[in-house]
Image (tube, rainbow, N blue to C red):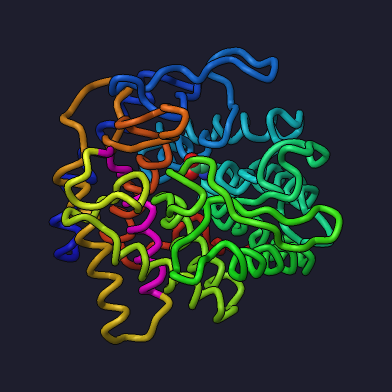
């Protein structure tokens, strides 16, 4: 075992214990996006489906946690449970159940692409390809962006994309590799190029969302949905920017995406409080009474590791890797809940949506997932995250 893995072993064990307890608590049902008073609840009914159904944008993270747990332990129980989730994802895309969203990458990569990569699951592969095709259907011309939310004809959503969408692009690259169809990669590169040019401000902070004219394709304006104000920098958005641009560089080879990731990282690192876990919006600094968003720190840690791995050996690479290690240390030591039994999070003190007062100072599924991914990436330096190309034969 490498020395880092030895140091991280107790944190990995704690996370695995919680994943096991949560599987006991929920079985094949899906927990909700975030905890309430520290406990995950059953996902509410919706879209004509009963409570506990595969709905919303975060269910892929619960399946991704099961795949990670299987990779760490080799336990058949995790593999079987993840496989049952994959069947649910296949039914979801086949029935177009709550699929009018750009979040198909968040949903189908850590569940179905992971299943294909780890076990050769053909049903997972077919479901992920169907999801990629559905995502292609969300491209708005002539802007060439993937619309984030809602029906494409909905005037309240038309022409808007959000920084989070960068993380959905790996589904396109994967589908391109699987099918040999270059349209997928072209679509990803066009979308990411638009975000590179418009969603990053001159000071390297980012807008949460950006609007394009749906008729002319002209870039219009930035705005926020979950941040403090249109001109502030929503912490999780900045973290999505680091990881999202870095992954898009890795998958496309476009050096301007690497530069975009570096810009996002510079701003993020320059605006952190001393324990390296940002307030929910980066307008707040040390001394503020506002809540932190631990999930932003977990995403940023994965992004910094990815960014570092794309740079040649040298001070900049060391700096990003060093900040990632220190962030994960801070999360493991100060932001994990005490062992709490069934239905608790792996990572406490996240914020889902402050303006709507949802999931404030609670655990959430993506925080849990990226925290565990960050632990995995540090403990196993050769491990390839699910967002990157699969290593298995793709024939
Ligand atoms: N992708 C939605 C969020 O980060 O809250």
Q: Residue at x 65, y 16 (%)?
A: 49
**Point 49% across, 71% down: residue:** 202
Q: Residue furthest toward the right? A: 215
The correct choice, above or below, for 229 with respect to 242 in the image is: above
Residue 391 in sight: no
Main SS type for the magenta part? helix
Is 137 displayed left or right of 393 in the figure? right
Q: Residue at x 46, y 52 (%)?
A: 237
Any part of residue 262 in sight? yes
Q: Position of residue 320 (x, y in %)?
A: 30, 71
Q: Tell me the residue at 52%/39% (across/down).
A: 60
State which quadrant residue 381 falls in.
Answer: bottom left
Relative depth, front residue between 159 and 304: 159
In this view, the residue in front, 333 or 206, is 206
Query: What stretch of residues is rendered in magenta?
Result: 290-309
Residue 212 lies, in percent from the top left, at 73, 56
Question: 198 or 116, which is in the foreground?
Answer: 198
x, y percent for residue 39:
32, 21
- Quarter of the image where the N terminus is located: bottom left
Q: Position of residue 351 (x, y in %)?
A: 36, 36
Question: Would you say residue 237 sits in the magenta stretch?
Answer: no
């Amino acid at each position: 075992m490498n020395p880092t893995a030895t140091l991280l072993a107790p944190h990995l064990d704690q996370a695995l214990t919680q994943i096991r307890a949560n599987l006991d608590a929920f079985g094949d049902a899906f927990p909700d996006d975030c905890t309430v008073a520290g406990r995950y609840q059953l996902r509410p009914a919706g879209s004509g489906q009963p409570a506990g159904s595969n709905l919303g944008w975060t269910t892929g993270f619960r399946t991704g946690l099961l795949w990670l747990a299987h990779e760490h332990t080799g336990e058949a129980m995790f593999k079987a449970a993840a496989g049952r989730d994959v069947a649910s994802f296949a039914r979801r895309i086949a029935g177009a159940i709550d699929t009018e969203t750009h979040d198909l990458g968040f949903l189908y990569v850590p569940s179905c692409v992971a299943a294909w990569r780890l076990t050769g699951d053909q049903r997972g592969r077919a479901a992920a390809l169907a999801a990629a095709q559905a995502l292609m259907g969300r491209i708005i011309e002539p802007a060439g962006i993937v619309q984030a939310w809602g029906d494409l004809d909905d005037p309240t959503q038309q022409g808007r994309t959000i920084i989070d969408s960068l993380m959905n692009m790996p589904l396109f690259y994967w589908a391109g590799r699987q099918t040999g169809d270059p349209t997928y990669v072209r679509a990803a590169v066009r979308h990411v190029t638009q975000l590179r040019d418009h969603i990053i401000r001159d000071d390297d902070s980012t807008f949460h969302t950006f609007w394009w004219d749906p008729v002319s394709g002209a870039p219009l304006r930035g705005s926020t949905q979950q941040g403090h104000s249109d001109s502030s920098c929503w912490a999780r958005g900045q973290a999505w920017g680091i990881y999202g641009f870095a992954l898009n560089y890795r998958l496309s080879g476009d050096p301007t995406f690497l530069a975009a990731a570096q810009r996002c990282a510079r701003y993020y690192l320059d605006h952190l409080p001393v324990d390296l876990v940002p307030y929910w919006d980066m307008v707040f600094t040390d001394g503020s009474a506002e809540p932190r968003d631990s999930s932003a720190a977990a995403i940023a840690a994965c992004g910094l590791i990815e960014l570092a791995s794309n740079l040649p050996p040298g001070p900049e690479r060391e700096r990003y890797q060093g900040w990632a290690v220190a962030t994960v240390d801070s999360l493991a030591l100060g932001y994990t809940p005490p062992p709490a039994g069934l239905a608790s999070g792996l990572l406490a003190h996240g914020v889902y949506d402050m303006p709507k007062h949802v999931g404030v100072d609670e655990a959430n599924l993506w925080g849990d997932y990226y925290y565990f991914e960050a632990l995995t990436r540090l403990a196993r330096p050769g491990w390839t995250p699910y967002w990157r190309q699969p290593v298995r034969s793709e024939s």
